[in-house]
Image (cartoon, rainbow, N blue to C red):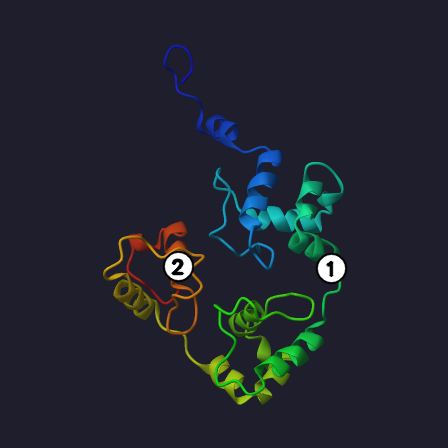
Amino acid sequence: ARPGGVPKAPQRAEREHRLSQEEKVKQFLAAMRGRDSPIFRRSAEYRFKDNTSMGYFGENCKTGKRCGKYPYDQLLANPVLRRDYYDEGKLSALQKVHEFLEAMRGRSSPISQCEVESVFSDNASMRQFWSRCKAGKKCAKPPYDQLMVNDVLRADYHKKSPSPQQKVAELLQEMQGRHMPIPQTDSETLLSHGARMGLFWTRCKVGSLCKRPPTASS
């Protein structure tokens, strides 16, 4: 409050709590530890201490070519961010399709979210590649349509995801006997369609979804 007890304007108080760019760089690098891919814009669960989006920050650094100057140049100390920033040795979509099909040869199940060791020759994540193919309905057009020659991938692609109500029931079942929530980094505790339970719970918290009953958009 100001002298005399008059509170600060909300906008001014909010500005005073914003992080500096140096602080954001440090927090972003800390969040990137152990990751095999950048934090994307849609990764709503990754936020700075001032509650602004890490995904938007990272994307703006890349598209705005900010990493040629301080403090953003410090981000390039991370090999994953450096490779993404310069697009070093990245495979084309067609090359990834071919490598993914090769990795799927002889498998009876798709590459799951817990298989962090499954990567392309450019070190990009295979599990995230397949998740994006499904979530973005990419397999209806080239070159991703070639993935549908694999029976396992085709069945997984057309499999219906559990409803929000089913996800809630699965999470509650898993939480029986636990004393702590499932962390989003837990890559082994999964929902029936292969997504991380911890990530589902994080999205529920970040989006304040628990204030209303589950719906088709949850």
Q: Earlier in the sequence, mark 1 or mark 2?
A: 1
CB atoms of marks 1 and 2 within 8 Å: no
Identify the disc placed on residue 119.
Answer: none
> Residue 121 sits in which quadrant?
bottom right
Mark 1 sits on what residue? 87
Mark 1 → mark 2, Cα distance in angstroms: 30 Å
Q: Residues within 10 Å of mark 2 (few under 14, many from 20)?
A: many
The location of residue 35, given as percent across then percent down, is: 56, 56
> Residue 218 sits in which quadrant?
bottom left
User: Residue placed at 51% from the left, 55% from the top?
Assistant: 43
Q: Which amino acid does the dot numbered 2 rest on?
A: Gly
Identify the disc placed on residue 198.
Answer: 2
**Horizontal relation, residue 1 to residue 131: left or right:** left
Toward the front, the furthest residue is: 117
The location of residue 108, given as percent across then percent down, is: 48, 86
Q: Secondary structure at mark 2?
A: helix
Q: Which amino acid does the dot numbered 1 rest on?
A: Asp
Whether residue 142 can be seen here = no
The location of residue 171, given as percent across then percent down, is: 31, 64
Q: Is residue 158 above or below residue 8?
A: below
**Horizontal relation, residue 140 to residue 158: left or right:** right
**Horizontal relation, residue 93 to residue 209: left or right:** right
